[in-house]
Structures are given as structure tokens and as C-alpha cells.
């Protein structure tokens, strides 16, 4: 690599771990002030990409050498851990994420990277579900797994855990999105589940490098990836201010479907606090819903209230059509970008 020779360094990892262009992008990402928007911007034109990278790195050689060394450290850890690092410059990068305005530019991957291109739905909800919440999660996860969908969730306690486990139980495909780096499982009690996901040909992804420190907003950012990967986000149960609302809002922002589970009569009669968010979406006026979900009125058309399993087939068909439209739209954008 000409870039590394310039700094007296070498990349001693397999190209199967990271592509050359992604390594360039990873190096730039280690420079202070180069966020996702900047990384997307310099990646728009492949013919000028490396020139732009070198220009950035030549602005401060000492800082750039440190950044490259950090990128090399990530690559070494990825190789030791048998992970992969993919970016928006790679064919493996998910089409569903590539053109969302705040998508990660780089993903650290543990497991079956091919799932990044698979059709996905997200199943999310409270860490403290009711008994009926667990039953519904299992039912939805198994049905959509058996019908060819990859189940996306965040490996959190409660609904996330139940969704991953239900999917695995029917030999389905599942992706867990971490709010930490790949070598730090959170919560720690789900470490065995994380191993099982990978062992069963699933995938764990994160946008955070191995040296990154944890912070609360990372889980909000994690939620947007779940929504962005998926054609629909199923909100099983949430309280009024539940964290699951972040992914729900992101789904609508990205033009995806939000499937809100209608609580069971028993949970309603028991006044369960973990269904209050669902009920607010179901029972509110359009103005109240728009404010609650921080979206425009037109986006409310993409909300479906799931009342029974007979609706699965209709949701499945809508999501397939949405995926076809997304692939077609992305192909047109790629063609347009190639002209300039």
C-alpha cells in the first residue's frame, strides 16, 4: 500500500479481513473531527477517493501516523478475533443502510457477513416484557424466520433476547447490533447467546472500534442501525418513555414500516406499564402520534397496528415490495453517482 509506505508502515492482515479502500477510510475515521458525514462525502467518487484520503492525512503527519496505527490495531484485533471490517466502499455493505443519511460508514462484523444483504425485519421492545409480550415475540420471530426473513435486534434483555432465541430455535437467521465494540458483550449475561448467534451462522455488528469507550448515546445510535437494516420494525412492548422508541422513530424517518403490537386484553386489564407506549400510539390522534414519534403526519401511513397473526401475510408482502423498491432506488443512485 502506497499510503502505508509513505508513513513507514505495513498492513499485515489478510484482504479477507479488510479491503484496501476500507482501510484508508478506517484510518481517516480515526482523525478527530472526521465523522460519518465526512466519511460518506469523501467516498462518493471512487476515482478521487484515495487522492482525498492522502490530502487529509498530509495535513498533519504526526496525527495521521497515530490514526493509521490505531486503524492497524483494529485490523490486528479483527484478524485475531476472526472478525471482518466492511465499509460503504465494499459490496458487502447493506443496501438498506447505504443511503440513509446518518448510516455508519464502517461496520465491524463477527459472523456471517452475507446477512448484511439479506431481507431483514427488526423486533424490539422493553427489557421487562409481560408473559404475553414474550409469547408474541416468539410467535412473530418464528413466523418471519420461517418465511425467510432475518431477525434484527440489539441483544438487550427482554424482547431482544427472546427474538434472537426464538429465531435460533427454528434455525433462522439473526443479526445482533451492538452498542459496544464487538469484544464487549452487553449485557454480560448474554455472552453465551452472542456466541450462539455466531455459531448458528448469524451475525453481530457494531460501528465502534475495539478501543472505543462505552457511552449511553451509543445505544440510541445502535437503535437507528436496527431500523435502517430492516424493512419493518416490530414494536412489541414499550412504556411511555422506553428506549425502543428510538428505533421506532428511526424506522419512520427512514421511510420504513413500524408495526405496533396491539396489547392483549389481559395486559390492558392489568394496566401493565410496559404497554403504555403501544397504547399511546394506537389510541392517540394523528397530531399526538406525530409529536410522540417525532415524525410528520404523512409518515403515520406506514404504521400498522398488529392485532392478530392473520396480518403476517399482508405485512410480509408489503415488506417484500418495499425491499424491491429500495433495491431499485439504490441501483439508480449508484448509477447516477458513477456518472460524476
Image (cartoon, grey):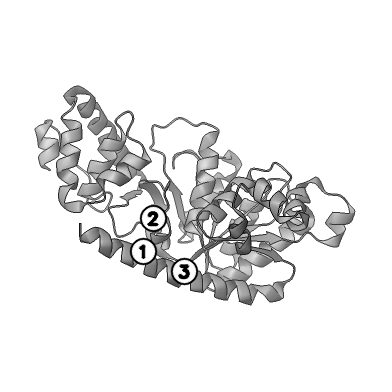
Percent position (x, y) of residue 305? 70, 64
Q: Report whether 93 appears left or right of 126.
A: left
Is the residue under label 1 in contact with that under label 2 (CB below 8 Å)? yes
Task: Between residue 330 and residue 166, name the one nearer to us.
Answer: 330
Q: Is residue 128 visible?
A: yes
Q: Secondary structure at mark 1?
A: helix
Going from the N terminus, do you reach mark 2 or mark 1 first? 2
* Mark with earlier residue (1, 3): 3
Residue with the mark numbered 3:
323
Residue 203 vs 314, above or below: the answer is above
In the image, residue 3 above or below residue 139:
above
Mark 2 → mark 1, Cα distance in angstroms: 7 Å
Q: What residue sits right under mark 2 in the picture?
A: 99
Label 3: how many residues lie within 10 Å, few (<14), some (14-19) or many (20+)? some
Mark in the foreground, 1 or 3: 1
User: What element does badge 3 sit on?
Assistant: helix
Q: Earlier in the sequence, mark 3 or mark 2?
A: 2
* Label 1 crowd (10 A; few <14 / some 14-19 / many >=20): some
Local packing at callout 2 (Cα closer than 10 Å; few below 14, some 14-19, many 20+) is some
Q: Where, by quadrant of the figure, is residue 251 drawn?
A: bottom right
Q: Of all residues shown, which one is farthest toward the top?
A: 62
Residue 264, image x and y in percent? 81, 61
- Establish if 29 lies above or below 199: above
The reply to whether dot 1 and dot 3 touch (C-beta < 8 Å) is no
Measured as percent of width and height from the top left, residue 76 is found at 28, 39
Label of residue 330 in the image: 1
Camera-nearest residue between 135 and 27: 27
- Kindly check if marks 3 and 2 are in contact, taking CB atoms under 8 A apart as contact: no
Camera-side residue of 246 and 22 = 246
Amino acid at each position: 500500500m502506497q499510503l502505508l509506505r509513505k508513513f513507514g508502515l505495513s498492513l499485515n492482515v489478510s484482504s479477507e479481513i479488510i479491503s484496501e479502500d476500507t482501510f484508508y477510510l478506517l484510518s481517516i475515521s480515526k482523525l478527530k473531527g472526521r465523522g460519518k458525514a465526512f466519511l460518506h462525502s469523501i467516498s462518493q467518487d471512487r476515482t478521487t477517493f484515495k487522492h482525498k484520503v492522502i490530502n487529509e492525512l498530509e495535513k498533519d503527519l504526526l496525527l495521521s501516523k497515530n490514526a493509521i496505527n490505531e486503524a492497524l490495531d483494529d485490523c490486528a484485533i479483527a484478524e485475531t478475533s476472526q472478525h471482518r471490517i466492511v465499509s460503504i466502499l465494499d459490496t458487502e455493505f447493506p443496501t438498506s443502510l447505504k443511503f440513509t443519511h446518518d448510516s455508519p460508514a464502517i461496520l465491524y462484523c463477527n459472523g456471517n457477513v452475507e446477512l448484511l444483504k439479506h431481507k431483514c425485519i427488526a423486533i424490539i421492545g422493553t427489557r421487562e416484557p409481560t408473559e404475553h409480550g414474550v409469547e408474541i415475540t416468539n410467535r412473530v420471530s418464528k413466523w418471519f424466520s420461517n418465511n425467510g426473513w432475518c431477525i434484527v435486534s440489539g441483544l438487550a434483555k427482554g424482547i431482544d433476547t427472546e427474538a434472537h432465541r426464538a429465531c435460533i430455535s427454528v434455525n433462522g437467521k439473526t443479526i445482533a447490533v451492538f452498542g459496544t465494540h464487538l469484544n464487549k458483550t452487553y449485557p454480560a449475561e448474554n455472552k453465551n447467546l452472542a456466541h450462539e448467534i455466531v455459531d448458528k451462522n448469524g451475525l453481530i455488528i457494531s460501528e465502534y472500534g475495539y478501543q472505543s469507550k462505552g457511552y449511553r448515546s451509543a445505544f440510541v445510535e445502535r437503535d437507528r442501525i436496527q431500523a435502517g437494516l430492516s424493512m419493518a420494525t416490530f414494536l412489541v412492548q414499550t412504556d411511555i418513555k422506553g428506549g425502543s422508541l428510538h428505533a421506532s422513530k428511526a424506522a419512520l424517518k427512514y421511510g420504513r414500516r413500524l408495526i405496533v403490537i396491539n396489547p392483549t386484553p389481559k395486559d390492558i386489564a392489568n394496566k401493565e406499564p410496559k404497554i403504555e407506549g403501544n397504547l399511546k400510539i394506537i389510541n392517540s390522534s394523528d397530531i399526538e402520534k406525530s409529536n410522540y414519534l417525532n415524525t410528520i403526519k404523512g409518515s403515520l401511513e406506514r404504521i400498522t397496528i398488529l392485532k392478530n397473526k392473520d396480518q403476517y401475510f399482508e405485512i410480509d408482502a408489503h415488506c417484500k415490495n418495499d425491499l424491491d423498491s429500495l433495491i431499485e432506488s439504490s441501483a439508480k443512485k449508484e448509477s447516477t453517482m458513477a456518472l460524476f
